Image: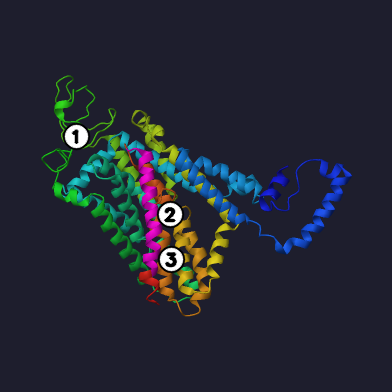
Amino acid sequence: MAEWLSQLLRDPLTCPPAGPTLTSQPHHSKWLSHSSTHTDSQVSTREPRMSPELISILVLVVVFVIATTRSVNMGALAFAAAFGVGTLVADLDADGIFAGFPGDLFVVLVGVTYLFAIARANGTTDWLVHAAVRLVRGRVALIPWVMFALTGALTAIGAVSPAAVAIVAPIALSFATRYSISPLLMGTMVVHGAQAGGFSPISIYGSIVNGIVEREKLPGSEIGLFLASLVANLLIAAVLFAVLGGRKLWARGAVTPQDGGAPGKGAEPTGPPAAARTGTGTGTGTGPGTDAGTGTTAPAAVAVRPDRETGGAGGTGVRLTPARIATLVALVALVVAVLGFDLDAGLTAVTLAVVLSTAWPDDSRRAVGEIAWSTVLLICGVLTYVGVLEEMGTITWAGEGVGGIGVPLLAAVLLCYIGAIVSAFASSVGIMGALIPLAVPFLAQGEIGAVGMVAALAVSATVVDVSPFSTNGALVLAAAPDVDRDRFFRQLMVYGGIVVAAVPALAWLVLVVPGFG
């Protein structure tokens, strides 16, 4: 029956009816013989059958539609789709389907969110937030740019982009929560910062792309590639800052670590007025007053959960304790291990989290529950299905179809769009490694500049990493504390769609059409 279903999906026009009577009744044998002859005589007049690659793309569209309209976890749908398409269309066994499971990303997501959940539970992120305020002298509007520059510096000196985002995003988004900054603004600034520095000559992405260019014997420019990515992401960050509330942040002026963003000193509260609150002794203010039933508490910058410690400057909320010192050491150790010794970020983070949990079990008890398991399921499911697409050749099929177009400029823009669309769900470096060789035939014609084409592909394939289905977008989604995660996911998805639709065309227009290189 499985073989019959597979044949039906591959070619429904020639698939015989199911059932044992096909071989047990003589008149059916006659029918089979007549049908075969009839089919052979008319094969040239029939419509082409639907290819397995096209079926797999249509199934992906169905997964998106169901997940969007029925509020079903897209990762669970993608696992089911990977099983159905892999078994019935691609003839893959379980090992072939699971070959696309992103085990390394699973460990990174779990490990990093576990470690930073501990940091949030014991108040370390609160201390870091106050330190960031002091660093910029209370100018909250500068914090998104500090995070942009920090992740850019990390990737420029050799950090893998997801590792830099994993280190910076939890701190940046904790600050966004405390001071009522848009999490979408802060998260995208972190990701675009990582991509801004991602193609320096000594970076991981830069080294890989420049190596591919050299291997394919194409003319290249290491500095040109770096500047193209830097300028593109810097311009996008400036637009985001202006659109997502940056001007209001400037208008706030400065806050101090002591006031925690209290009204009258820059930040605006997001909770109810102080007069409307009836203190319950849970400590939801940023000041020391927490007496029950007094009707007055110090104003808070944002609403926080009752179990979250938020003492003022003179309280325990910003004071270094042994647990916080150990957590800061663990965060520094994570950076050193990843950047200095090239250790896996996920495994290192899990190990450090286990050490902290063992030493301070009370602070860490809630951390496992705060791991973003729904995000882990979503990302791992989608990437497993993308792995099935790669295994059955769908990605190569689409790229070769575009590469065969006779108009070089049209082929160039389509390759940029393929790189952007696929990179929104899969490895950006892997896609660039596949698409740059596909561009070689029409680059050899001399009508398209190789330097500009490679730069456009690099920008198109990496700037879309804000998508919640990419590694960086998933890390931002998982790191955001105290947000409506479903709403934040939709925001990232919509913004990622806008980037996919707009940036490849702009990169093509600016870098390819003028013929650079």
- Is 119 a magenta residue? no
| Crowd tier of the residue under label 2, counting other residues whose Cα lies within 10 Å: few below 14, some 14–19, many 20 or above | few
Give the Cα distance between marks 3 and 2: 27 Å
Residue at 83 percent across and 50 percent down: it is 31
Separation of marks 1 and 3 at Cα, in angstroms: 46 Å
Q: Which residue is at 49% across, 48% downward? A: 104
Please tell me in which quadrant of the rendered image residue 47 appears: bottom right
Mark 3 or mark 2: whose residue is earlier in sequence: 2
Q: Position of residue 463 (x, y in %)?
A: 38, 58
Q: CA distance from mark 2 to mark 1?
A: 41 Å
Question: Given the image, on which type of amino acid does mark 2 rest?
Answer: Asp
Give the side of residue 176 with respect to residue 476, left or right: left
- Residue, disc 3: 457
Crowding around mark 1 (Cα neighbors within 10 Å: few <14, some 14 to 19, many 20+) is many
On screen, residue 36 versus residue 381, left or right, reads right
Q: Nearer the viewer, residue 203 or 428?
A: 428
Q: Give 51 or 478, whichever is nearer the viewer.
A: 51
**Label 1 belongs to which residue?**
300
Q: Which residue is mark 2?
A: 342
Q: Crowding at label 3, few (<14), some or many (≥20) Cα neighbours within 10 Å?
A: many
> Of tags 3 and 2, which is closer to the observer?
3
Determine contact: label 2, label 1, CB under 8 Å: no
Which segment is the magenta one?
483-508
